[in-house]
């Protein structure tokens, strides 16, 4: 960071003529560049040297810099924006490669319950009895059957294997009878704190289990065993695979929720890491960071420790378990799941904060966001630090008081990005009154809060252009519009997806805009999102993705 910052300052001070001596590696011209740099919002061309933007300006000026070894790219009027930043992503490449996917990870697609059962039957045939058969990327509102998946459906997969279908949201799962039997859960088992065993109209288990109630399944049944070498291979392949997917959609920086740090480094060493990683540590890795004095910001421009992994305080938005101050409409007083006590939350935030690590809690509902802010304000009183930028993952449902406290804390929310397009089928569960205060980009930007785009993949698809369309229109795939008061402009949505994302990891000095001295991360788009029908923004093609001046994806 020290060297990079010095380089930036030096380059900014140099006059344009001085760059002629740079012999740029690449000159891009005839482009419509939206720089997201308020000092020079628009440009036609730029030159790249040493993986950074070295000069920015008109096509003729930049072409004048072309030297003997300079490569050139004629953008032929296409649009260029800074590389997109996803500030919350579980980056589950191993799941994409090796597991049974019962839903579409990337796009809106409806499937049938019979199709899910058939896919899982194939997997069950390969596994010995009492070994878990698992399905991933289930979305309960993307079923053609228009009814929920049940324990009886999953009994059709197998009565000898425990079967689980995981909702892509990550907070609810659906089990078969064998799974309940192994875990000794019956219709009379009480709900534990922070979770539920859901019942049908007759009071029988219906198969759905929420949040912490799922812990009873953790140590029952067998799971496929891998040697350490097999595991390492799977992790490396997973990272390399998802890196390709990220750049295909124009993401050049992604904040990873944990994951195998060694695998990420191995993939980088073999040249297959195509995007930059802000590594968000949890569990043992976080404990080891604290023990060894590793703080946020340690690493380099490709792999760097960012905030912590999301520390979960409540349930899910998409699966309707987030902690609300008022009951869910029509749910018999149910207010969602708080998954950690205020005392535990205070202790965790204080410990991380004292260690010089940027805190990051998952807080969806207004109750959970308030609990997190209580803990952060307490930690700051006990141990003041400057420019912490506490990260609020999701920060879904806000109110005026929370906005005031978020602003005062200097917090950085990572709001759901693609949900406003992808998940409108979930919004009727909350109703318009709540949706007018949910994923509140307009309110937060107006308050001067630098909110960011966190897809939460796998829960949400990660396509930034799908996210931008939802932010601009608040209209979903089903053509319904929710919380239109939270619409933002295309320019604001671009800033949210680029510069604000860089700010969230304290990297705004080196990325997030097309500015001289910053890393040359950018995306070439087939069409200008300002110019197309807003309902077609997601259909704009990513033509080329460039990271550090190197093309990592080309359509
Ligand atoms: Zn998450």
Image (cartoon, rainbow, N blue to C red):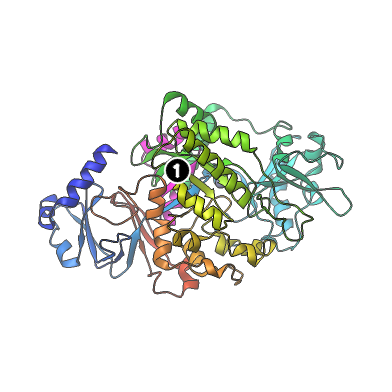
Local secondary structure at mark 1: helix
Magenta stretch holds residue 193: no
Q: What residue does disc 1 label?
A: 240
Q: Magenta stretch?
A: 244-273
Quadrant placement of the C terminus: bottom left
Q: Residue at x 48, y 47 (%)?
A: 242
**Percent position of residue 315, x then y:** 65, 47
Query: How packed is label 1: few (under 14 Cα within 10 Å), some, or many (20 or more)?
Result: many
Relative horizontal placement of residue 432, taking residue 291 as reference (left or right):
right
Q: Residue at x 24, y 38 (%)?
A: 3
Quadrant of residue 84 within the rendered picture: bottom left
Ligand 1 within 8 Å, label 1 CB: no
**Percent position of residue 537, x then y:** 46, 68
Relative horizontal placement of residue 205, taking residue 173 as reference (left or right):
right
Q: Residue furthest right?
A: 202
Magenta stretch holds residue 254: yes
Quadrant of residue 530 within the rendered picture: bottom left
Residue 137 can be seen in this image: yes
Q: Residue furthest front?
A: 381
Q: Nearer the viewer, residue 348 or 554?
A: 348
**Percent position of residue 359, x then y:** 49, 39
Q: How many marks?
A: 1
Q: Nearer the viewer, residue 22 or 476?
A: 476
**Percent position of residue 420, x then y:** 56, 63
Quadrant placement of the N terminus: top left
Q: Residue furthest top?
A: 291
Residue 365 can be seen in this image: no
Q: Residue at x 67, y 33 (%)?
A: 223
Q: Is residue 247 above or below residue 235?
A: below
Q: Nearer the viewer, residue 229 or 206?
A: 206
């Amino acid at each position: 960071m020290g060297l990079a910052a010095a380089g930036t300052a030096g380059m900014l001070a140099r006059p344009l003529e001085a760059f002629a001596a740079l012999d740029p590696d690449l000159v891009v011209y005839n482009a419509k560049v939206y720089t997201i740099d308020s000092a020079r919002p628009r440009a036609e061309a730029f030159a790249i040297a040493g993986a950074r933007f070295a000069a920015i300006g008109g096509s003729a000026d930049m072409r004048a810099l072309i030297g003997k070894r300079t490569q050139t790219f004629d953008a032929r009027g296409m649009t260029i924006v800074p590389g997109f930043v996803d500030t919350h992503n579980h980056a589950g490449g191993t799941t994409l490669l090796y597991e049974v996917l019962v839903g579409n990870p990337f796009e809106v697609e409806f499937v049938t319950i019979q199709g899910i059962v058939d896919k899982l039957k194939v997997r069950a045939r390969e596994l010995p009895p009492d070994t878990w058969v698992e399905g991933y990327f289930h979305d309960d509102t993307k079923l053609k059957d228009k009814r929920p998946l049940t324990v009886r459906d999953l009994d059709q997969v197998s009565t000898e294997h425990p079967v689980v279908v995981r909702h892509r949201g990550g907070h609810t799962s659906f089990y078969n009878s064998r799974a309940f039997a192994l875990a000794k859960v019956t219709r009379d088992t009480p709900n534990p704190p922070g979770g539920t065993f859901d019942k049908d109209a007759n009071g029988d288990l219906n198969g759905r289990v929420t949040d912490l109630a799922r812990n009873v399944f953790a140590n029952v049944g067998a799971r496929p065993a891998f040697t350490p070498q097999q595991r390492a291979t799977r992790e490396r392949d997973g990272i390399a695979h998802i890196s390709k997917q990220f750049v295909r959609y124009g993401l050049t920086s992604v904040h990873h929720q944990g994951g195998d740090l060694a695998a990420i480094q191995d993939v980088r060493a073999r040249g297959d890491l195509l995007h930059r990683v802000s590594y968000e540590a949890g569990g043992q890795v976080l404990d080891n960071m604290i023990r060894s004095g590793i703080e946020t910001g340690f690493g380099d421009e490709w792999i760097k420790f960012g905030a912590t992994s999301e520390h979960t305080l409540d349930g899910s938005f998409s699966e309707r378990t987030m902690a609300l101050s008022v009951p869910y409409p029509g749910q018999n007083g149910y207010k969602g799941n708080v998954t950690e006590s205020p005392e535990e939350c205070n202790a965790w935030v204080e410990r991380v904060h004292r260690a010089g690590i940027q805190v990051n809690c998952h807080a969806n509902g207004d109750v959970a966001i308030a609990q997190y802010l209580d803990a952060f304000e307490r930690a700051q009183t006990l141990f003041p630090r400057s420019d912490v930028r506490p990260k609020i993952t999701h920060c879904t449902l806000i109110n005026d008081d929370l906005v005031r406290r978020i602003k005062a804390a200097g917090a950085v929310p990572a709001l759901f990005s693609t949900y406003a397009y992808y998940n409108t089928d979930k919004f009727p569960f909350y109703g318009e009154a709540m949706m007018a205060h949910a994923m509140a980009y307009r309110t937060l930007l107006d308050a001067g809060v630098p909110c960011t785009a966190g897809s939460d993949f796998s829960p949400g698809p990660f396509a930034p252009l799908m996210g931008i369309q939802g932010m601009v229109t608040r209209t979903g795939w089903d053509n319904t519009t929710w919380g239109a008061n939270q619409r933002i402009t295309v320019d604001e949505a671009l800033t949210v997806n680029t510069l604000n994302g860089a700010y969230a990891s304290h990297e705004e000095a080196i990325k997030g805009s097309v500015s001289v001295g910053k890393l040359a991360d950018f995306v070439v788009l087939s069409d200008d999102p300002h110019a197309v029908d807003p309902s077609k923004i997601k259909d704009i093609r990513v033509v080329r993705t460039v990271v550090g001046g190197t093309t990592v994806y080309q359509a």
